[in-house]
Amino acid sequence: MELACIRDKASGPVAYSECLNRQIASLKGSPGIPNLSGYDSETRQTMELACIRDKASGPVAYSACLRKQIEGLSTVPRSQ
């Protein structure tokens, strides 16, 4: 949330607070950020890197991106 509100922070405490409140409100309807602990380190890092731009938009956008990455993994055939 802080990253998503960095521009507002430069505009002062009121703008920053309003941005944080918007981020918090958007989280209320969100399923939250998925738990990636079940994935190996390389896979986790790759998913997080793929979503770095979305992370700058806030936790809801970041969560949606990670979920898309997880869904994509389920459609990739595993090598044997």
Image (cartoon, grey):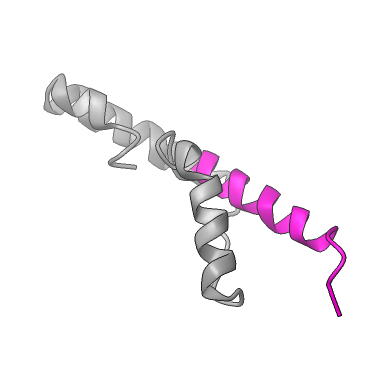
Number of numbered discs: 0
Q: Quick check: 5 above or below 45? A: above
Point 76% across, 55% down: residue: 71
* Residue 31 pos. (x, y %): 60, 53
* Residue 1 pos. (x, y %): 34, 42
Point 58% across, 76% down: residue: 40
| Residue 23 part of the magenta-drawn span | no
Nearest to the observer: residue 51 or residue 32: 51
User: In the displayed image of the protein, which residue is found farthest to the top?
Assistant: 11
* Residue 30 pos. (x, y %): 58, 47
User: In the displayed image of the protein, which residue is found farthest to the front?
Assistant: 80
- Tell me the magenta residue range: 60-80
Q: Can residue 12 be seen by looking at this rendering?
A: yes
Q: Can residue 33 be seen by looking at this rendering?
A: no
Q: Quarter of the image holding residue 65?
A: top right
Point 12% across, 23% down: residue: 12
Q: Quick check: 77 above or below 31? A: below
What secondary structure prevails in the magenta region? helix
Q: Quarter of the image holding residue 32?
A: bottom right
Q: Quick check: 66 above or below 42? A: above
Classify residue 13 as left or right of residue 31.
Answer: left
| Residue 79 part of the magenta-drawn span | yes
